[in-house]
Image: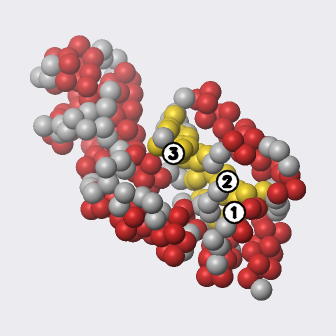
Amino acid sequence: MGTPSLPNYHGRRLLREVKRLRELAGLTQEQASTRLHLTLQKLSRIENGQLPGYHELRAMLRLYGVPRLDWEPLLDLWERARKRGWWRDFGLKDSGYVCMEQEAASVTEFQLGLLPALVQTERYARASLQHADDAETAVSVRMRRQQRLFENPLVLHALIHEPTLQQGVDREQLVQLVDRAQLPNVTLRIVPQSAGLHSGLEGSVTLLSFTDPREPDIVFTETVLGLAQTQDIARTSAVRRRLEQLATLALSAEDSLDTFKALIW
């Protein structure tokens, strides 16, 4: 039986490919469902977000004329789609952002009031999350998320509003900023206070991108009302342009690194 829950990134890739293969084979959903001995509704659910069972997937690949030698990558995607995410062990009520960040290839963000979560020390994270409903779990999740910078390295481009460096940032945190800024997959740049009024003052924003060109970018913003997200292409494109504009106001990565070092002393 397929699971009714929405699939992860690997599952979404698989379902897009399964639909493409059906269309390439010249079969309508009705024709394919009849030959697969599935209801039309079941096949429609699969192509719109329900992961098929293992044997259902094999039957589809056989029907759609996929050579046996080409099955392995698709079966591997199925296995990855079924894999339990590490965040489930923390009992998160809403793991939407964490799940997407784990699957992303790159993160581009502007942070207005706090340092980017992926470069925070545990002490800084604990101070910034002290009012969370379950602060200890939130801190543990934030620390666990940072492993993506070292395992299957996530590319991070972070723009930091300069006043943030004067708000609860101790020597330990500055040393970590220097260390993280020197990772080959991390770019930290400071948007100086002298830049004056700019669009970043409207709030922090994070844009995630993926290796699969068919997986649209997703934007997240957070306010006191909670986390909002969109994969609407017009909106994500507008956010990308805003981030690019903010980047033109920022110090270079080298000058930003020198600033972090100077603040330590």
219, 67: nearer the viewer: 219
Q: Around disc 1, counting alpha carbons within 10 Å, would you say few (fewer than 14), some (14 to 19), or many (20 or more)? A: some
Q: Which residue shows up at 34% across the image and 17% down it?
A: 26
Reading the chain from its start, which is encountered first: label 1 or label 3? 1
Amino acid at dot 2: Leu
Q: Vertical placement of 47 versus 177: above or below?
A: above
The numbered dot on residue 112 is 2
- The C terminus: image quadrant: bottom right
Cα distance in 3D space between marks 2 and 1: 7 Å
At which x and y percent is residue 38? 14, 23
Residue 71 visible in the displayed image: yes
Q: Nearer the viewer, mark 2 or mark 3?
A: 3
At which x and y percent is residue 250? 81, 56
Q: Which residue shows up at 31% across the image and 49% down it?
A: 93
Q: Vertical placement of 216 versus 155: above or below?
A: above
Asked if labels 1 and 2 touch by Cβ distance under 8 angstroms, the answer is: yes
Residue 146 visible in the displayed image: no
Cα distance in 3D space between marks 1 and 3: 18 Å
Asked which secondary structure carries label 3, the reply is loop
Q: Around disc 2, counting alpha carbons within 10 Å, would you say few (fewer than 14), some (14 to 19), or many (20 or more)? A: many
Q: Which residue shows up at 45% across the image and 60% down it?
A: 131
The numbered dot on residue 164 is 1
Q: Is residue 57 left or right of residue 143?
A: left
Asked if labels 3 and 1 touch by Cβ distance under 8 angstroms, the answer is: no
At which x and y percent is residue 233? 58, 29
Asked which secondary structure carries label 1, the reply is helix
